[in-house]
Amino acid sequence: MKRDKLKVYIVEILLFIILFLALFVSINRKLMALILLTLSIVIVNTIKKKKAKSIYKNQVLYLMIGFGVIYLIIFYLMGLYFGYYEAPAKFGFKTIVNFILPFVVIIISSEVIRNVLISQKFKYSDVFVLIDMVLVDLIVYTGVYDISNFEDMLTVVGFILFASIACNLLFNYITIRFGSKGVIAYRLMTVLFVYIIPIIPDVYLFFRSFLRMIYPYIIFVVLEYTYSKTNYATAFKDKRKNIITTTILMILMVLLIALISCRFTYGILVIGSGSMTGSIDKGDAVLFKQYNGSSIKEGDIIIFTNNDIKTVHRVIDIENVNGEYRYYTKGDANQIKDDGYRVKNDILGKSLFKIKYIGYPTIWLRDLFGEKY
C-alpha cells in the first residue's frame, strides 16, 4: 500500500514538473497532444486504475451530454445580444487534422490521467490532479495568449485560470463518483463546437469566463440533488447560508464583469495618469455612463478615445460647425488643452463619480510589466 502511494505521488510530482516547464515553452497543440498521450500510456501501465463503484455511470453520461447541449444553447442565445462572427477555422480536413484531432487526444488523454490518479483516493491526490489539469488548460491557452504581455497575462490569470479551476473541481468530483465518460463527453462538446459550427457568438471574454465559472456549480448542485445519499432537504437547510453567500458573490461578480466590460449602460475605468489630479487622482476608478447622444456641456468630464487610448478629461469649450459639435478638452492638472477636438463618435461616456484608490493594484501590475497607459 505504501509503495503504491509513493508511486502515485512520484508520478503526480513528475507530471507537475513536466507541465509546469511546458507552460513556459512554446508548445503547439499537436505536440501537447503527443506529450499527454505518452504520459497517459505511461501512467496507465505504471499505476493500476481503481474503477468507480457507481450504478449511475450511464445516467451521468447522458446527463452531462444534456448539460453540454444546454451550455451551447445558452452561449448561442447570448450571441443574440453580442452578435456573431464567422468561425476562423472552417470545418474540413485541415481543421480536423490541425484542431479537432489534437484536442480530442488532449481531452481524452488528460481525462485518462485524471481517472487513474484520482481513483487511488490517496490524501491530497485530488489536489495534485486539480493543479495538473489546470496547467494543461493554461498550456493550451498560452498558445493563444502571450503571458509576457500585461493584457494577455490578465486574461490568462483572471479569466482562464479561475474558470479552469471551477471546471476541474467539477470534473474531479464527477470522476471520483461516476467515472470519466461524462466528463469526456461534456468537454468534447464544449470545446470542439467552435471548429464544427460555422458561426460563433461574439461574447465578451469576461462573460464567457463567467459562464464557465458558474455553470460547473449549477451542474454540481443538480448532481448532488439527484444522486446524493443524504436527505437533500436536510443538506439544503444546513448549507443555506453557503448558498446565499455564493449567490450574493455571483451577483456581485456579474455586476463587476458588466462594469469592466464597458458593454452595457455603465462602465468603470482606472485612472493611470495625474492629468486630472485634484478632481480625479491617479489610482482612482471612474464610474461612467455610456454616451447615448445626450447633451454635453462645458465642465462635464467625459471619457473619450484618442489614438486607441481611453482618456478622462473635462470639456472646456464647445463649437457647432455645420451642425457638428466639436468638444475641446483639457486635464484639470494640465497647463494646456488637449490637441484637436472630440466629436460624437470619439466619446464613450460621461463621468458619474469616482471611487478612491481601488485602481492601484492594476497600476502596480502594469508598472511591473512596463506597460503604459
Image (tube, rainbow, N blue to C red):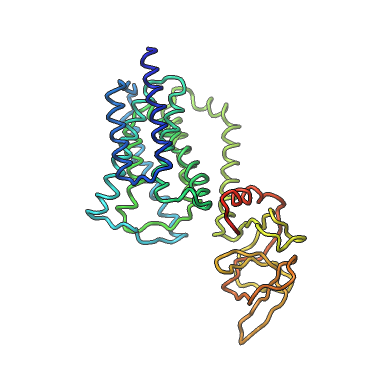
Quarter occupied by the N terminus: top left
Nearest the viewer among 140 and 179 is 140
User: Picture coordinates of residue 254 (x, y %)?
Assistant: 56, 48
- Residue for point 43% across, 61% down: 83
Nearest the viewer among 364 and 2 is 364
- Tell me: 306 left or right of 332: left
The single residue placed furthest to the right in the displayed view is 278
User: Picture coordinates of residue 234 (x, y %)?
Assistant: 54, 25
User: Picture coordinates of residue 18 (x, y %)?
Assistant: 39, 34
- Tell me: 145 left or right of 341: left
- Residue for point 29% across, 42% down: 104
- In the rendered picture of this protein, how many numbered marks are placed on residues? 0
Q: Place residue 25 in its image quadrant.
A: top left
Quarter occupied by the C terminus: bottom right
Residue 244 to residue 146: above or below: above
- Tell me: 108 left or right of 333: left
- Tell me: 122 left or right of 260: left
User: Picture coordinates of residue 212 (x, y %)?
Assistant: 46, 44
The single residue placed furthest to the top in the displayed view is 1
- Residue for point 56% across, 29% down: 239
The single residue placed furthest to the left in the displayed view is 93
Residue 24 to residue 319: above or below: above
Q: Place residue 125 in its image quadrant.
A: top left
